Amino acid sequence: MADSPRPRCYQTFLADLKRRRVFKIAAAYGATGFVALEVADIIFPRLGLPDWSITLVVALILIGFPVALILAWALELTPEGVQRAASARSGELEAIVAQPRRSRWPAGLLALAGTALLLAGIIFIGGRQLAGWGADANGGPAAEPAADVAATAGPSVAVRPFADMSPDADQAYFADGVAEEILNSLARIEGLGVAARTSSFKLRDEDVATVGARLGVSSVLEGSVRKQENRVRVTVQLINVADGFHLWSRTFERELTDIFAVQDEIARAIARALRIELTGAEAAALAKRGTENIDAYNAYLLGRYYWNRRTREGLSSAKAAFEEAIERDPDYALAYAGLADAYSIMAGYTYEPPQSVMPRARAAALAALERDDDLAAGHLSLAFVQQTYDWDWEAAERSYRRALELDPNNAFAHYWHSILLNVMGRHAEAEVEILRGRELDPLAPQIGNGIGQHYMGLGEFARAAEILEEVLEVDPDFPGALANLGSTRVAQGRYEEALRATERYGGLRWGHVRVRVEALWGLGRHAEALALIAEARAEADTLYWDPVMLAGLYATVGDTAEVAKLLERAYAEKSATLALGLWYRWVFRHHPTYNQLMRRMGLAAPADKF
């Protein structure tokens, strides 16, 4: 019988690798290393760890791979512990070579797969980290980020509110404010679609895929802020919606006074990541700062945080914070615009009599524009005063158009402009404007509610109800939509449904009272309706009630004399609701006093239309 051919050198070497379990170690290390890289890439930024920590993990895993293979070759684990690997016994390697391929190949293939997986992780994650290298632990100059966005879609981004990672968890206003400032900076870049604040912030707890689908964006920016004494750490990551991978991430650890530079660097880095080349004007706009005073900036962010609550208490706190910002920096134009907005919403939400706050709103808006005539927020603040208090419709339109010229993607500027166009009788233009607002900020309940009011004012109640129900699907407890849906149901003769719409209300809120009086009167429960009106009138002795709203209650029960007196009082007090209340244009459409007042204000009277 002939001897078997002697194995070649490479065959015995491979057989020895298998005998010493080097192949198994390569496969296991590769798979484990890949998982460790992915975990570090996802978890480290959320823990606020600096970028170099991920780079360190990549380096350690890369260095550890050959070390693991060498140790597997040189050592073996025995019952007596780790010992130096013994040499192959006579014929042992030849026996391995003589095995069928199905016994020999799996170990080698697994080793190749593990190695390939590890290299893929190192190239993808490590390459991206090295591309972004160039800043030290203190967040030096931002490096060119590596990124790729689907070529079939234009670059777009949603900025989610940043998580507050501060030791006492008391800096939510600051974290939200930093995110909003970055959003505002990105919105100045032509060619970049930026989802509006209200919609982006409403989806703070949704996954990236949901955000992308709901807002139609290709990427999402999220992050965290850790503020402690005079230090701040901002960690951000830009995530591709299509696959969930990071396009760019970075951690900035700086002195608190450097937060302005950090926000600027983040905006520039995102533009690079999405392959957008900034113009000189855009770069200058990003570098523009409202203030250099960090205490004024901190107070301004706190003011906006409270202002967004739109409650009586929140607006009072917002006013105090904006005043502190102005005290810290008397030239801070944005703080004056914020103060104007606080006063205006106090009147617009009927928390305060217009004559006590709107002159102050006008003064603050003018002060903002004296300091920065190119401030869109200042022109928007002034437009609101001109519309709701001065009743100077042409001036208000000029201010809205200037605000939109400076900030064309401001959803709420389109929304408020649409209300002006509506009261001026230009309903088709108003519809275009408010639908543009919804396109820019699709989840903003105020805008959706405004669309419902637009159709209510035109008597198109089926369309109004459809829109208002959509708003309540997103925000089930939004008061304005609940009240307007209730009034819509009353207009449709569906009184029981209208009453149910008021069940989520708490306290004697005017929307609650309005709908209940309308529904109860429609159901023939007149005594209950009159008792509710008496209760509201009693509360009006201690808390401000807009006379137009009280007149609406009396119009429901047919007391035309009281309606006339209250409307005349509203005109004398410069009621904001006379210029904003689209629903009341329908309610009072046949009342002579209301029509006379509209003509006196230079507006088309609803009697001329209906």
Image: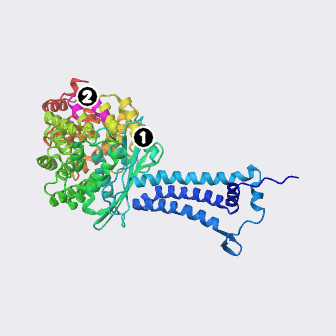
The reply, left or right, for residue 56 in relation to residue 357 is right
Q: Residue furthest bottom?
A: 80
Q: Is residue 500 something one can see in this rendering?
A: no
Q: Amino acid at mark 2?
A: Glu
Measuring from the top left, give residue 450's x and y in whole percent: 31, 37
Binning the other alpha carbons within 10 Å of mark 1 as few (below 14), some (14 to 19) or many (20 upward) gives: some
Main secondary structure along the magenta-highlighted residues: helix
- Residue that appears at 51% across and 60% down: 62
Q: Nearer the viewer, residue 520 or 578?
A: 578
The reply, left or right, for residue 90 in relation to residue 507 is right
Observer-side mark, 2 or 1, equals 1
Q: Nearer the viewer, residue 221 or 591?
A: 221
- Residue that appears at 74% across and 52% down: 103
Q: Earlier in the sequence, mark 2 or mark 1?
A: 1
Counting labels gives 2
Q: How is the image coloured?
A: rainbow
Question: Relative to residue 437, is residue 141 depicted above or below?
Answer: below
Q: Nearer the viewer, residue 566 or 601?
A: 601
Q: Badge 1 is on which residue? A: 214
The secondary structure type at the circle numbered 1 is helix
**Membership of 422 in magenta stretch:** yes
**Membership of 532 in magenta stretch:** no
Q: Amino acid at mark 1?
A: Arg
Q: Badge 2 is on which residue? A: 429
Instruction: State if disc 1 and disc 2 touch (CB < 8 Å).
Output: no
The reply, left or right, for residue 570 in relation to residue 131 is left
The secondary structure type at the circle numbered 2 is helix
Measuring from the top left, give residue 559's x and y in whole percent: 24, 36
